[in-house]
């Protein structure tokens, strides 16, 4: 199938990283794929190294006539059967034509950006239900999940390089440092666990406030702000526990990433994690914003290594069955055949 992947997202982010994984995977699976992206030399180089044809456009404001015209010409020249628009901005620029249009939102975004799409593909059933509640036709709303890479065999990052003492319990959290991620709640929970150290990997507008909050709690010496990292598998291999503290999380690839690393998982019951995690089987769920409950769950996992190992093994099985590359590519191919038989 001839596929055009159009991405106008941010430099960093979960949906952007999955786009970078899926696009070459679809090409390797036999599809003829081109990618048209917002100017990003690093992303373009990564896709070209994987053998994917790349065009870069500005994807600016409403009066960016250059992108309007060049995108139309690129699509008319390639003649795709399906065009997948990633992010609101991309779908605003994609023209209608003799192709099936698919929107791939990263969350609960206004459907006005997808009004010209033939189909919309979300990561979770709860997002599909939400779109239908907003008036989107049920037969044109689909759940097609993300896959994460298998990190099996990745050596752990050395604790000394991270500034963490050997032998202490170590939790890992990852994500954009934004209020939606609830990292203030996580810091409050860490303050209740005096032996626990925390790695916080990510960057964003709340970093200064979070550093100040950690200092006010007296836990700065036990919290490492790592910035944006490219070595997630090595960080997960070094940790004893993965924690999600989000107040709002549409899906969260970090859930299957933790499962893939056979890492015990504690999460708030935000939208995406609450849908996919089976409480007390492959993870523990606690109420959003409840630092006490989050601390109690983390303490329970650390106090029961045997139980934590059983839970981590169940998570690994979920990854292999539902969120591994083969499992998800099978679902993407079924979806593409369904919308363009």
Image: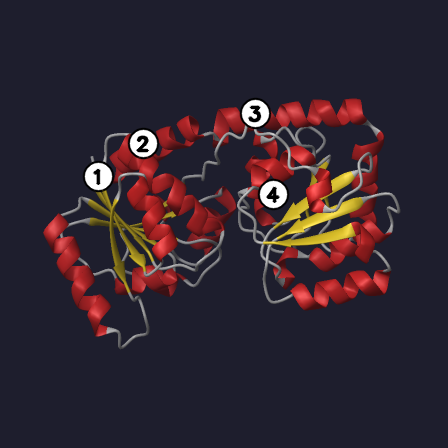
Indicate the secondary structure of the residue bearing disc 3: loop
Tag shown at residue 334: 2
Q: Earlier in the sequence, mark 3 or mark 4?
A: 3
Residue sticking out furthest to the bottom: 63
x and y percentages locating residue 89 in the rendered image: 35, 64
Q: Badge 4: few (under 14), some or many (20 or more) residues near its Cα, within 10 Å?
A: many
The reply, left or right, for residue 282 in relation to residue 339 is: right
Query: Is residue 190 in view?
Result: yes
Q: Earlier in the sequence, mark 3 or mark 2?
A: 3
Residue sticking out furthest to the left: 77
Residues under labels 4 and 2: Cα distance?
A: 24 Å
Q: Give the residue pinned by disc 4.
A: 273
Q: Earlier in the sequence, mark 4 or mark 1?
A: 4
Q: Quadrant of the C terminus?
A: top left
Q: Give the residue pinned by disc 3.
A: 153
Q: Earlier in the sequence, mark 4 or mark 2?
A: 4
Q: Nearer the viewer, mark 1 or mark 3?
A: 3
Q: Badge 3: few (under 14), some or many (20 or more) residues near its Cα, within 10 Å?
A: few
Indicate the secondary structure of the residue bearing disc 1: loop
Figure check: 259 above or below 91: above
**What residue is rendered at 41% in x and 32% in y?**
328
Tag shown at residue 340: 1
Q: Does the CB distance between marks 4 and 2 fall below 8 Å?
A: no
Residues under labels 1 and 3: Cα distance?
A: 38 Å
Q: Badge 1: few (under 14), some or many (20 or more) residues near its Cα, within 10 Å?
A: few
Q: Nearer the viewer, mark 3 or mark 2?
A: 3
């Amino acid at each position: 199938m001839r596929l055009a992947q159009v991405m106008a997202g941010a430099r960093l982010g979960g949906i952007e990283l999955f786009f970078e994984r899926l696009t070459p995977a679809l090409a390797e699976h036999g599809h003829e794929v081109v990618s048209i992206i917002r100017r990003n030399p690093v992303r373009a180089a990564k896709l070209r190294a994987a053998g994917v044809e790349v065009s870069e456009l500005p994807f600016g404001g409403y009066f960016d006539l250059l992108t309007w015209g060049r995108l139309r010409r690129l699509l008319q020249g390639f003649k795709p059967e399906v065009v997948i628009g990633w992010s609101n901005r991309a779908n605003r620029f994609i023209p209608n034509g003799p192709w099936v249009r698919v929107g791939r939102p990263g969350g609960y975004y206004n459907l006005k950006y997808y009004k010209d799409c033939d189909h919309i593909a979300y990561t979770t059933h709860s997002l599909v239900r939400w779109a239908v509640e907003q008036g989107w036709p049920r037969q044109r709303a689909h759940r097609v999940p993300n896959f994460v890479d298998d990190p099996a065999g990745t050596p752990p990052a050395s604790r000394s390089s991270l500034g963490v003492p050997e032998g202490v319990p170590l939790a890992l959290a990852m994500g954009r440092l934004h209020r939606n991620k609830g990292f203030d709640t996580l810091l409050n929970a860490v303050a209740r666990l005096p032996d626990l150290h925390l790695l916080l990997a990510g960057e964003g507008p709340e970093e200064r406030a979070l550093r100040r909050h950690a200092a006010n709690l007296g836990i700065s010496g036990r919290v490492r702000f790592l910035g944006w990292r490219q070595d997630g598998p090595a960080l997960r291999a070094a940790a004893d526990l993965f924690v999600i503290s989000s107040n709002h999380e549409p899906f969260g690839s970090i859930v299957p990433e933790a499962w893939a690393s056979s890492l015990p998982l504690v999460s708030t019951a935000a939208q995406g994690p609450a849908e996919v995690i089976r409480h007390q089987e492959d993870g523990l769920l606690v109420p959003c914003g409840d630092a006490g409950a989050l601390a109690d769950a983390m303490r329970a996992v650390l106090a029961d290594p045997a139980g934590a190992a059983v839970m981590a093994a169940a998570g690994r099985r979920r990854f292999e069955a539902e969120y591994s590359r083969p499992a998800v590519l099978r679902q993407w191919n079924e979806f593409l055949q369904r919308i363009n038989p």
